[in-house]
Amino acid sequence: MLVEERRTSKSKSQSIILENRERLSVSGVEHVTSFNENIVLLETIEGGLIIKGKDLDISRLNLEDGNVVVNGHIYSMQYTEKESTSNKGAGFLGRMFK
């Protein structure tokens, strides 16, 4: 991603709309890291977003617009810092041998 593209994505806003704990609409999404029926990992302009639940399904995905819709039984949502997602693979030994 170019520096100019990063500046453009930073100027975008993010919104999260949860309807009846069954339909979650997220804007400002840059990348879907992984997903299965129990967890969805997203990279957003505000950091990583972990969505946990049951029978989760991505019903709409448009990364050009940065919009994702997740259906299922949503139990929790948690943000992570952008730095922690980039150092995810470092682990104990990675920090020891820096």
Image (cartoon, rainbow, N blue to C red):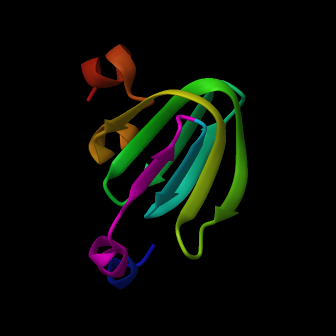
Q: Nearer the viewer, residue 56 or 48?
A: 56
Which of the pair 68/87 is nearer the observer? 68
Which of these two is toward me, 65 or 92?
65
Magenta segment: does it hold 12?
yes
Tell me if 3 is positioned left or right of 70 in this view: left
Residue 80 coordinates in the image, percent (x, y): 32, 37
In this view, the residue in front, 89 or 22, is 22
Question: Quarter of the image containing the N terminus?
Answer: bottom left
The part of the image, by quadrant, that contains residue 7 is: bottom left
Pick the quarter of the image with the C terminus: top left
Residue in the picture at 62% in, 53% down: 69
State whether residue 62 is above or below residue 96.
below
Q: Was residue 53 drawn as part of the magenta stretch in this picture?
A: no
Residue for point 35% across, 74% down:
6
Q: Is residue 56 left or right of residue 31?
A: right
**Residue at 32% from the left image edge and 70% from the top image edge:** 13
Residue 14 image offset from top left, x and y in percent: 36, 63
Relative height, residue 67 to residue 88 (above, below): below
On screen, 87 above or below 59?
above
The segment highlighted magenta reads 6-21
- In the rendered picture of this protein, how many numbered marks are placed on residues? 0
- Would you say residue 87 is visible in this rendering? no
